Structure formats: C-alpha cells, structure tokens
Image (cartoon, grey):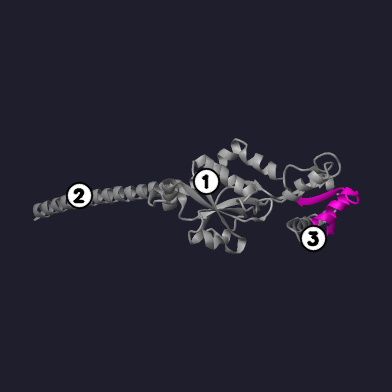
Amino acid sequence: MLILNLNQSIKRSKTMHKLNNFQLLATKRALIIFMGCVTLFVVFNMIWMLHGESAVETDETWQRIQQQNFVIVGVDVNLAPYGIYDPSGPRGIDPDIARAIGKLWDVEVHFSLVNYDGMYDSLLVGDVDILIAGVRPEPRRAAASRYTEAYFDSGYVLVSTTGSQPTLEEIQGKILGVVFATDGDIWAQSYLEEHPNAFTLQQYDDTEQLLSALNEENIVYALLDKVSAHQAHQQYPHLSIADEPLLSNPLVMVVRRSDWKLYAELQRAIKILKANGTIDEIIQRWL
C-alpha cells in the first residue's frame, strides 16, 4: 500500500511538473505576443508622430498642384502693406511671398481675394489651397486647419527719439506712448498691473497723434506695431526702433488639416526663403 501511494505521488508530481512547464511555456508565449503587440504599437505611433497622416493618406491637394502646375492662394487686398488691390494683380508682402513660393515650386500662383470673415470658409470648401493673408494662428481652428511657422512677426516694438535702440529697462520711470485700445495698449496696461509705477502710460487716439507727440518730443518712447514703426521711420528718420518685439504677433500661412504634404512643403519653402533672405527683402521693400 505504501509503495502504491508512493507511485501515485510520483505520477502526480510528474503530472504537476508537466502542467507547470506547460503553464510556463504558455505564459512565455503570451508575454512574447504581448511584447510584440506593444512594439508594433510603439513603432506605429512613432511613424504617426513623425509623418502624421502621410503614413496612411494621400494629399490630393499637393498631387493636384503638381499635376496641374498651379496653386491657389487667398490674399486680403484690404490689409496694406500685406495686401494691396491692383487691377493687374494683388501687390504687397503676402502676394510677393506667395509668388516667391510659386517660383520655388516651379508652379503658377493664382490669387483669390478673401477677407477675414470668409477666408476660412474659402479654404475649407476648397476655393483656395493656402491662406497668406496676414493671419494669426487661432487654436480654436486647429481641428480643421494647419498653421505654418511664422513668416513675419508684426508684433509691438519700442520706438524712441534717443538715437539708440530702446529697451524695456530704459523706459523705467519714463512716459510710454501707445495708441488707445490697441494690443500695445493692452500689453502696457497688463505690464503695469504686474509692475506698478514701472512707467507712465500716455494714450493717444491714433498713430498720427502718437507720432506727432514723438516728433515734437512731448514723449520720448512709444510702443507701435512693427509695420507702423517702420513706416514712421520713413517719415521721421531720427526715430530708433528696437529689433525684438515686446509683444509678439506671428503671421502664419494656413492650409487644410488634411493637406499634410502641402503643409510640409510650405514649411520647407518658408525655411528656404528665410535662409536665403527672400522674405526679409520682400518685407523691407514694402515697409
């Protein structure tokens, strides 16, 4: 009886050992499968992050541009110096940059006249391929649109009559002139809330009044958007303009969210035209 029980125990032990080995093998196999799935998931996500929809979708807009040899650009001709109406074709910073991009891509540029109220509709229904119309990025539109890097920062810069580039530290305790209700005015008021008595804020009804005050030396410092500042410098050459804006206002180009390839090529074009000085040359020409 003892021998029989011993044999049964040995058999049971062998059976349990086999079961344990089988379970271990199954566990290892399941772990390998799981790790494989995780690896595939990570790789897929890396591809998605690096290339976005390019991994799974075709950009029909970019294909059409290449095949038909033209791109449709929406510009606002009521936004000088960015866009100016001319019967022979739009003029200004934005149309000239669009033409430079067309030259880089070796395609024709067809212009469509837009305004802020309707330009996103024109883009989304396919009337235009790209918006280059003095546009600021708007996060609320990001689900349907892609914004490029800035091609120009039209933010607010310090202007002075001191003969040297003004700085924020330099205006401490001085009078700073702004145009009432502009972004520059809002920035200055916000700065004073955080830094009481940093400077005295003097508001003017319009840019002309502000420039007259500068020219007559009623004030020494002013905060103007970059376009107004450079235009003022043409009228009053003794004015000095800071290089860097205190308040940034990036102007970007816009394409449809689905046009990933067009977006990538547009980003590349902006970088090239910045690097070779084309964009700076165009901006200086119109400022």
Callout 2 crowding tier (Cα within 10 Å): few <14, some 14–19, many ≥20: few
Where residue 227 appears, x then y in whole percent? 72, 49
User: Is residue 189 depicted above or below 150 in this figure?
Assistant: below
Side (left or right) of 78 relative to 110: right
Is residue 143 visible in the rendered structure shown here?
no
On-image quarter of the N terminus: bottom left
Type of amino acid under label 3: Phe
Mark positioned earlier in the residue sequence (1 or 3): 3
Is residue 276 visible in the rendered structure shown here?
yes
On-image quarter of the C terminus: top right
Q: Any magenta on residue 205?
A: yes
Residue at numbered disc 1: 266
Q: Residue at x 61, y 60 (%)?
A: 115
Where residue 42 appears, x then y in whole percent? 40, 48
Q: Secondary structure at mark 1?
A: helix
Viewer-nearest of discs 3 and 2: 3
Mark 1 and 3 residues: CB-CB less than 8 Å, in contact?
no
Q: Residue at x 57, y 60 (%)?
A: 119
- Give the CA distance from mark 1 to mark 3: 37 Å
Residue at numbered disc 3: 180
Residue at the front extreme? 87
Residue at numbered disc 2: 17
137 or 193: nearer the viewer: 137
Q: Which residues are magenta?
A: 200-224
74 or 8: nearer the viewer: 74
Mark positioned earlier in the residue sequence (2 or 1): 2
Type of amino acid under label 1: Leu
Viewer-nearest of discs 2 and 1: 1
